[in-house]
Image (tube, coloured by chain):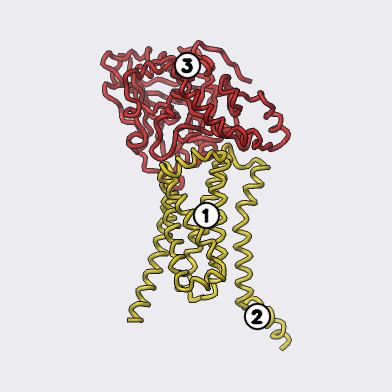
Chain colours: A red, B yellow
Amino acid sequence: MIIRIRKKSDIPSSEITPEDVYINRRKFLGATAGIGAAAFMARGAAAAEARVPGSRPGIAGPAAGRQDLEPSSWEDITSYNNFYEFGLDKKDPARNAHTLVTRPWTIEVDGLCAKPGEYQLEDFVKPSTMEDRVYRFRCVEAWSMVVPWRGFPLADAIARAEPDPSAKYVAFETLWDPEQMPERRWKPRIGWPYREGLRLDEAMHPLTLMVTGLYGKTLPNQNGAPLRLIVPWKYGFKSIKSIVRMTFTEDEPPTTWATQSPGEYGFYSNVNPNVDHPRWSQATERVIDTSRLFTRRIDTLFLNGYADEVAHLYAGMDLKKFF
Amino acid sequence: MGNAAVRRPRASWIADPKRQILLLKIAVWVIGLGPVVWLTAGIFQGFLGANPVEKIIHVEGRWTLVFLIATLAVTPVRRLSGWNRIIQLRRLLGLFAFFHACVHFLSYAGLDYFFALGLILDDVLERRYITAGFTALVLMVPLAVTSTRGWIRRLGKRWQRLHRLAYVAGGLGVLHYYWKVRADTFWPLVAAVTLAGLFAIRLAYRGKRKKKGG
């Protein structure tokens, strides 16, 4: 059951797709449409039903585009995750994250703000009104889902912390507890804890969410319980999970992937089909959908389809340089 | 006396080198076709996870490397063990490496890109990990073609030189794997170390032979 409140920001993507992207998409789809239409494979009667044209619009039909966001299944969203603290395979977090203890949970707020301190999760969340938002989620690895999150605008939490005028960025940290995140086979050369950050205006944007739930239920551990960030126009790794710390800074904070591999991952990491990852193309993406086996890739949208809302944040910036 | 009469044929059944090779060949066929059977079952039973296309490509890529490394291990194992007949497995192992490489490439080109040739060509030319993988596949084509007895006879000494390309293909395959992963470099490094070890054994024996000869 999805409780979905249409927000002002939920503009159909048909309106917000930049024209050039739209035209490119048709070109791409035109080239593959003939094969595509014939090539879907049913996995069973249920799958066949789900394939009735129009029943899952926006995922593979060329005409449907992505005008309506049909959420990915609970199963897909909770079984295909990147959460390296719990293993490197996509299935690992669902298998291993049960060791994460999410209550009690404290969030440390520090840095350049008037109200630093250690907040209990309940106190951090309670003053805000929960909202359900269906967002596209685009991973830097060129796959995507559509996720019905439940949360509140990060702007609320930031306002309550009363950042100093000198604060220009907000940094986040994921829990790092080897007791709860036991050494598996091999840890990548990542400096733990996982760190992410946003420019303050990005963080204050109404689309930016602090998430505590999924499909109206409590957020599962593998999805970043009990509290995670969602920045829908950025690659998924920016949306840091299981947050224990929020720090206001004057300088751009170091972030995990940009530190790990600066040539491949930038601080901004906005979804951008025109700026490829050095090793692979970002022009298209594979929609994760177990109910349909072989679907063609879809074109990735500039700023993940949220350009109308957030493009102004990057006015005058060279997004190839600030990737 | 009666006991000995019973035991003797059984012992010779297992000791027969021809039978040993036959059994090993059957095992190679089973292991070689196994992944494809498993993936096909997975497609219809739905146990390949949320991203079956990626799963198919990854599984087939890994089996390509397993068979490539197994092929390249034949000569070192032969030198170390002195068991010369193992050479009879090499062609089958090599052809299974090529088979999985083809399934791997076709899953990428067909299932992932729906044979959108423009996009594939972009990948092959611009993405170094795809360039490496594709080159490895191309190098394996002449090796598969000249794997028949007729070609071995026709090429004579040149056959061996040509088939050293298998090492190049193996190296490129491992590089392809290493360049693709984001942080989990464990298995690519295991593959690289194994390949380097096999190559070192080969060089060591080559050095020995040269010393003897000179």
Q: Which mark is residue B179?
A: none
Marked residue nearer the N-terminal end (2 or 1): 2
Q: Secondary structure at mark 1?
A: helix
Residue ranking furthest to the top: A8
Q: Which mark is residue B12?
A: 2
Within-10-Å neighbours for mark 3: few <14, some 14–19, many 20+: many
Residue occupying the point 43% across, 51% down: B188
Residue occupying the point 55% across, 50% down: B60
**Would residue B6 appear left or right of B143 to someone viewing this image?**
right
Spatial CA span between label 3 and label 1: 48 Å
Position above or below: B190 against A165: below
Quick one: A70 or A129, which is closer to the camera? A70
Q: Amino acid at mark 3?
A: Phe
Residue A161 rendering spot, x and y as whole percentages: 35, 15
Residue occupying the point 53% across, 73% down: B153
Could you say which quadrant of the image residue A57 lies in? top right
**Would residue A225 appear left or right of A36 to someone viewing this image?**
left
The residue under label 3 is A152
Q: Nearer the viewer, mark 3 or mark 2?
A: 2
Quick one: A137 or A11, which is closer to the camera? A11
Spatial CA span between label 2 and label 1: 35 Å
Quick one: A1 or A161, which is closer to the camera? A1
Q: Secondary structure at mark 3?
A: strand
Residue B5 rendering spot, x and y as whole percentages: 71, 85
The residue under label 1 is B64
Q: Amino acid at mark 2?
A: Ser
